[in-house]
Amino acid sequence: MQYATLNTGVDMPLLGFGVYQIPAEDTERAVSDALAAGYRLLDTAAAYGNEEAVGRAIKSSGIAREDLFVTTKLWVQDAPAEDNTRRAYETSLHKLGLDHLDLYLMHQPFGDVYGQWRAMEALNREGLAKAIGVANFYPDRLLDLIVNNDIVPAVNQIETHPFFQRADYQALMGEHGVRIQSWGGFAEGRNDLFTNRLLAEIGKEYGKSVAQVVLRWLTQRGVIAIPKSVRAERMAENFDVFDFRLTDGQMAQIATLDTGSSLFFDHRDPEIVARLGGHRLDV
């Protein structure tokens, strides 16, 4: 396994397992299979509704806690967000059955962002969240958060895949010590990703699938990836990406696939802000 060193000095696996859109009733088995395949980074969220199942899989795995890197995410909180955030953190921790998180992310750039961040800073200082970060923050929101607070986010988890590559934004984040993490690394198969001729041709040269080429492309860029699958054989395939390296020419070819636009939604769109920002979770 290869690692990304966060601005806290903590090493985070470059490749992990995500559980977004895995039904709660299937999550425990899926996470158990992922851990058996070698994954040690697990990524969930309060909004996914499957933290308890992730926790059960962790407990039954017998893997030492120090060998795991567990991430969950805080949903949108209104004022008093500092109190709400602490309560939401405690709820997630209880569901996971853990005594601390390796990474706690603010899931959306909405609500009382600064109240949420102040509470997350406190959790970090107390050692309850070894690192804190954000998700879905565009450059203006991220830089505003950085310059107006004490702790720089360790990670920004954003849509990143061959059709929306975020290279310039990755460079900007790097200047401020923020690591990029991808969600939607396979673009959920949109734009016929899995039959893309260029990616398939590159994969053929190494005896690898399109999915493996995409994961190697992400991790070779230093992008932390968290592919999801409910099939054990696919999990193993996705994990087997560190025995080859793409050439500079191949990386440049893949760069030509970038459209520069989201395939899902833009967090700056007022309709998206109203929909996501207005949705609350019971904690």
Image: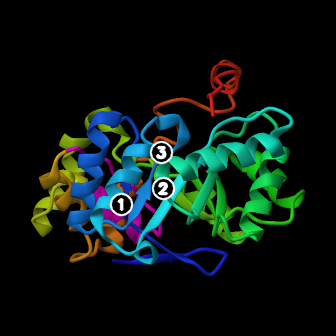
The residue indicated by pointer 2 is: 97
Mark nearer the viewer, 3 or 1: 1
Pointer 3 local density, CA inside 10 Å: few below 14, some 14–19, many at least 20: some
Q: Position of residue 180 (x, y in %)?
A: 56, 60
Q: Secondary structure at mark 3?
A: loop
Picture coordinates of residue 23 (x, y %)? 33, 33
Question: Which region shows up in magenta?
Answer: 213-230
Q: Mark 1 and mark 2 in contact? Answer it, CB < 8 Å.
A: yes
Of 49 and 38, nearer the camera is: 49
- Determine whether label 3 and label 1 are within 8 Å by CB: no
Q: Earlier in the sequence, mark 3 or mark 1?
A: 1
Task: Tally the numbered discs.
Answer: 3
Is 214 in the magenta? yes
Label 2 sits on what residue type? Gly
Q: Residue at x 54, y 29 (%)?
A: 265
Give the Cα separation between the discs numbered 3 and 2: 36 Å
Judge left or right: residue 252 versus residue 179: left
Mark 3 = which residue?
A: 164
What residue lies at 38% left-to-right and 75% top-to-bottom?
Answer: 64
- Amino acid carrying label 1: it is Lys
Q: Amino acid at mark 3?
A: Phe
> What kind of element bears circle 2?
loop
Q: Residue furthest bottom?
A: 9
The picture places residue 146, in percent across and down from the top left corner, at 81, 59
Q: Which mark is residue 227?
A: none
Label 1 neighbourhood size at 10 Å, few (<14), some (14-19), many (20+)? some
Q: Using the rendered view, name the quadrant where residue 202 is placed.
A: bottom left
Q: Which mark is residue 59?
A: 1
Q: Could you say where residue 245 lies in the image, as x and y percent from the top left? A: 27, 75
As displayed, is residue 109 above or below residue 9? Answer: above
